[in-house]
Image (cartoon, rainbow, N blue to C red):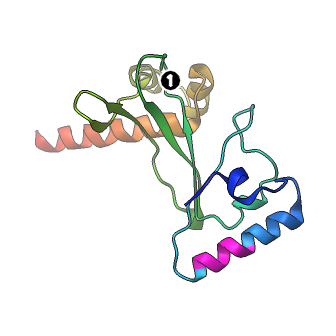
Amino acid sequence: MFDTLSSIFRFDTNDTDNWANVNDFLRRLRFAGYCVLLVHHAGKNNTQRGRTDGDDHLDVAIQLEKRSGWAPGDGLQFEWRYEKVRHGAWLAGFEAGYDKTTKTWAVLEDDRTDKVLEMLAAGDSQTKIARALGCNQSTVSRIKEKADKLAKLNGSRE
């Protein structure tokens, strides 16, 4: 695990030659059978710093974001979103939080669920809902998929 990109490799992330050297090193580790985890920080605009050359050889890229409605004092909570999954696959993101009383992690319900389902029932597109709620379309899709699975489960029991 390399945490963080800038502290381990110490190079200008806008330099293509430096990226080529780092990627060659990471590929050698991967071909030797290692699972390589690379951590780096988002810039001020909430996207990665520097060039995207470093993502070219990644199998999976995730982004942790602040949960919708989170406020200081709510404890450790985040939205886990997949930005890249190789081979055309798709993985559902989720929200989670740590309960310091029970010392356990839990998947949390998105506080936008009711509004998303209401807008879907009204016939709004996922794109329109995402824009209206200020979230990613993948968040709307995840909420819809979960609701569809629950409806299917409930329908099969009757």
Mark 1 Cα-neighbour bin, 10 Å: few <14, some 14–19, many ≥20? some
Examine the structure image and report whether residue 25 is included in the region drawn in magenta. Answer: yes
Please name the residue shown 72% across and 44% down the image.
48
Q: Is residue 133 above or below residue 14?
A: above
Q: Is residue 76 above or below residue 69?
A: below
Task: Indicate the secondary structure of the residue bearing disc 1.
Answer: loop
**Amino acid at dot 1:** Ser
Is 6 positioned to the left or the right of 33 in the image? right
**How would you classify the magenta stretch by its main secondary structure?**
helix
Q: Quadrant of residue 156?
A: top left
Quadrant holding the N terminus: bottom right
Measured as percent of width and height from the top left, residue 78 is found at 47, 33
- In this view, which residue lies farthest toward the left? 158
Please name the residue shown 40% across and 41% down the image.
145
Quadrant holding the C terminus: top left
Is 8 positioned to the left or the right of 74 in the image? right
Measured as percent of width and height from the top left, residue 81 is found at 53, 43
Please name the residue shown 70% across and 52% down the image.
7
Is 53 positioned to the left or the right of 17 in the image? left
Camera-nearest residue between 35 and 60: 35
Please name the residue shown 43% across and 16% down the image.
73
Measured as percent of width and height from the top left, residue 112 is found at 44, 22
Q: Is residue 55 above or below residue 40?
A: below
Examine the structure image and report whether residue 72 is included in the region drawn in magenta. Answer: no
Q: Which residues are magenta?
A: 24-30
- In this view, which residue lies farthest toward the bottom? 32
Residue under label 1: 68
